[in-house]
Image (cartoon, rainbow, N blue to C red):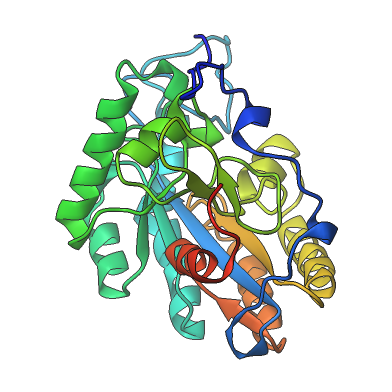
Amino acid sequence: MNAPEDKAGARMLPTDRIVYSPITERMPLKLPGGARMVVWFIVNVEEWDATQPMPRTVLTPPAGGSPSPDIPNWAWHEYGNRVGFWRLLDVFDKFKIPSALAINGSAIAAYAPIVQAAVKRKWEFMGHGFTQRNMQKVPDERADIRKTAEVIAKACGRRPRGWLGPGLTETWETPDILAEEGYGYVCDWVLDDQPVWLKTRGKPIVNVPYTQECNDVAMMLIQHHKASEYYDRAMDQFEQIYADAKGSARVMAIVLHPYIMGAPHRTKYFRRIVEKIRKKRGVLFWTGEQILDWYLKTGPKAP
């Protein structure tokens, strides 16, 4: 697929959408109350289609290939929504901190009790594709993005302001379509510790810091670390970003999937992260839309 063209007729490569800016040379960002940094949590709730190859696997079939149905791997994921989510929810409730729920549009109907629990706690809902697939393989990207917003609005009473592509996948046009469909921010561009503006063919959109490093998919499923790595890496990252934020605010994301960190042998490490960070002064626990509103008010103006 060719890159889309901006208003001047030039193709918009990633370097066209965002100008390089060293964080040390920007005007300082200040948080309310003298806080140093924001930590935000993103819980990814997905529906995996049992008739299709599984997006991720924990077991490979004895004879290889992509069996259908793939019961072991479908059930491995389904455990997260049946059990793991509720284990993680206990941690959020205990410490009275919010999360953003990045949810497939199709999961709204499939996992109604999860949706109801998030609505009750006033969590933010983020678009995460209508189905859990690469956005480059979606037949009609705009329709997918629009339909996702519509079902979220019906479920929680307002349209989502943020978007996280499944697997961080985008087409050349994704930021343009998101801005045109009314989204205020995206998380796919994991390249900074502060929000940044992305140019589109119309109005710009904000990219809110997300993470690949403090992400349970990367640590547990790709790098195959033991469960305690989640705590060790999150705390090491937190301590460095906290130090970096002495003169200008920073944002740190922590990402969870119920079928991964909701597993019995892993949840305690998530709990320990929250326990430790809660004791540190100058840390705000916000959602993505709170970060967006703060940046729109106090950050640099849109290009």
The x, y position of residue 37, in whole percent, is 68, 74
Rendered view: 206 above or below 275? above
Q: Residue at x 44, y 30 (%)?
A: 201
In this view of the protein, can residue 293 be seen by the observer?
A: yes
Residue at 51%, 84% (x, y): give it: 95
**Residue 49 x %, y %:** 32, 28
Q: Nearer the viewer, residue 71 or 300?
A: 300
In this view, 150 is above or below 10: below
Name the one closer to the observer, 177 or 21.
21
Is 185 rendered above or below residue 115? Answer: above
- In this view, the residue farthest toward the left is 154
36 left or right of 74 in image: right
Horizontal side of residue 52 vs 283, given as left or right: left
What residue is rendered at 75% in x and 38% in y?
A: 223
Residue 144 location in percent, x, y?
Answer: 29, 30
Task: Report the number of numbered marks.
Answer: 0
